[in-house]
Image (cartoon, helix red, strand yellow):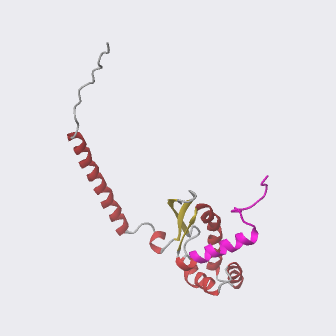
């Protein structure tokens, strides 16, 4: 029974899991995005949110918490000085997870996890809204043309007559 067992184990012991999570969080902070399996993304999402929330406080205690979870100086520095201040007005939900499809080898669901940028925080920008409208209109026009072509190509077939056998 799994009573009071917290989190995903991912088939690893505690030290392996900690190293995996640190590596994934490090990649996400340094690059801004990360491609991994859905289970791993779900496992680190809470950790990333907690670290960014702690980084926003910008006290000595919060800095120490961040540095204890991310021992590399470059990673903790980027989180505390660049990423966390950009989320001052946002309460939570600093990451976005988009499904990419199944991996060919084992069928695991791959996802792209990204830190939400400024234009995604305020909603869709006008440019992206205009693009989505133009794409949907072009799709509708294409569908209308396809249905016209299908109606023109209908062929009337004669009903089959069974041959009598002797």
Residue 6 image offset from top left, x and y in percent: 74, 61
Farthest-out residue, front: 166
User: Is 155 placed left or right of 28 in the picture?
Assistant: left
Residue 14 image offset from top left, x and y in percent: 75, 69
**Residue 25 appears in the rendering:** yes
The answer to which image quadrant residue 55 occupies is bottom right
Name the residue located 58 percent from the left edge and 85 percent from the top edge: 81
Give above or below for 79 relative to 21: below
| Magenta span includes 89 | no
Q: Quadrant of the C terminus?
A: top left
Name the residue located 26 percent from the left edge and 44 percent from the top edge: 147
The answer to which image quadrant residue 129 occupies is bottom left
Give above or below for 155 relative to 64: above
| Magenta span includes 3 | yes
Q: Which residues are magenta?
A: 1-28
**Residue 52 appears in the rendering:** no
Residue 22 image offset from top left, x and y in percent: 66, 75
Name the residue located 62 percent from the left edge and 61 percent from the top edge: 39
User: Is 96 placed left or right of 65 in the picture?
Assistant: left
């Amino acid at each position: 029974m799994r009573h009071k067992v917290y989190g995903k184990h991912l088939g690893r012991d505690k030290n392996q899991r900690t190293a995996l999570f640190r590596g994934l969080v490090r990649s996400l902070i340094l690059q801004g995005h990360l491609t991994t399996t859905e289970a791993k993304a779900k496992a680190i999402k809470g950790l990333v949110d907690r670290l960014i929330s702690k980084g926003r406080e910008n006290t000595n205690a919060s800095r120490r918490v961040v540095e204890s979870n991310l021992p590399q100086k470059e990673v903790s520095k980027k989180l505390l000085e660049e990423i966390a201040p950009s989320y001052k007005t946002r309460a939570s939900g600093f990451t976005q997870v988009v499904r990419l499809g199944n991996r060919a080898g084992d069928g695991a669901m791959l996802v792209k996890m990204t830190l939400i940028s400024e234009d995604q925080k305020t909603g869709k920008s006008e440019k992206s809204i205009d693009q989505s409208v133009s794409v949907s209109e072009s799709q509708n026009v294409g569908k209308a043309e396809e249905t016209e072509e299908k109606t023109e190509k209908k062929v009337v077939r004669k009903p089959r007559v069974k041959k009598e056998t002797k």
